[in-house]
Image (spheres, rainbow, N blue to C red):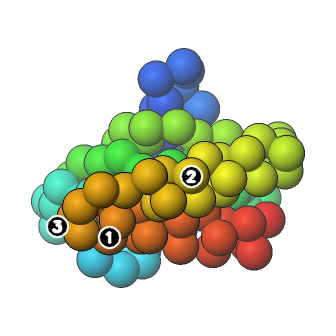
Amino acid sequence: MAYTFELVSPERLLVSEQVESVVIPGTEGEMTVMANHAPVMATVKPGVVTVKPVSGAEQRYVVFGGFADILPEGCTLLAESAVAVGDINKADLASRIQDAKDDLADAKTDEERTKAEEFLNHLATLHDAV
């Protein structure tokens, strides 16, 4: 059974189509969303979103955080930043990792340090995934 999935970044609408399922990297764990899913609002961590469209081959997108609004008839993922895995610029990812390392070194409080460490770990996982 198909439902509508939309992946939106501040720059553009990346996906808007009928899909069988979507795997989202939620902060509470990876979740597979299918038609008739219970309503949920989930925080998305940096990771890979896997889309299985009704019309074709699996698609993968790297997202850098955001929120997913999941309803029985559809899912909208509002990403802070998103790009198709095939379009990923490894130099850009390496730059983001270096920026995260700099943020970690500049952290003044335990809270800032913890947040920077988590983000750096997410980026390292993404680097390994692509």
Instruction: Give the percent coordinates (x, y) of residue 127.
Output: 73, 66
For the point 60% across and 47% down, the residue is 99
- Mark 2, residues whose alpha carbon is within 10 Å: few (<14), some, or many (≥20)? few
Sequence-wise, the earlier of marks 1 and 2 is 2
> Which residue is labeled 3 in the image?
38
Q: Amino acid at mark 2?
A: Asp
- Mark 3, residues whose alpha carbon is within 10 Å: few (<14), some, or many (≥20)? few
Q: Is residue 66 above or below residue 118?
A: above
Q: Quick one: SS at disc 3?
A: loop
Sequence-wise, the earlier of marks 3 and 2 is 3
> Which residue is labeled 2 in the image?
102
**Where the N terminus falls, by quadrant?**
bottom left
In the picture provided, is 74 more to the left or to the right than 54? left
Residue 31: which numbered mark, if any?
A: none
Tell me the mark number nearer the camera, choosing from 3 and 1. Answer: 1
In the picture provided, is 44 more to the left or to the right than 20? left
Between the C-alphas of marks 3 and 1, the distance is 32 Å
Instruction: Give the percent coordinates (x, y) of residue 89.
Output: 83, 43
Between the C-alphas of marks 3 and 2, the distance is 40 Å
> Which residue is labeled 1 in the image?
114
In the picture provided, is 18 more to the left or to the right than 42? right
For the point 23% across and 61% down, the residue is 109
Out of 57 and 77, give the one closest to the viewer. Answer: 77
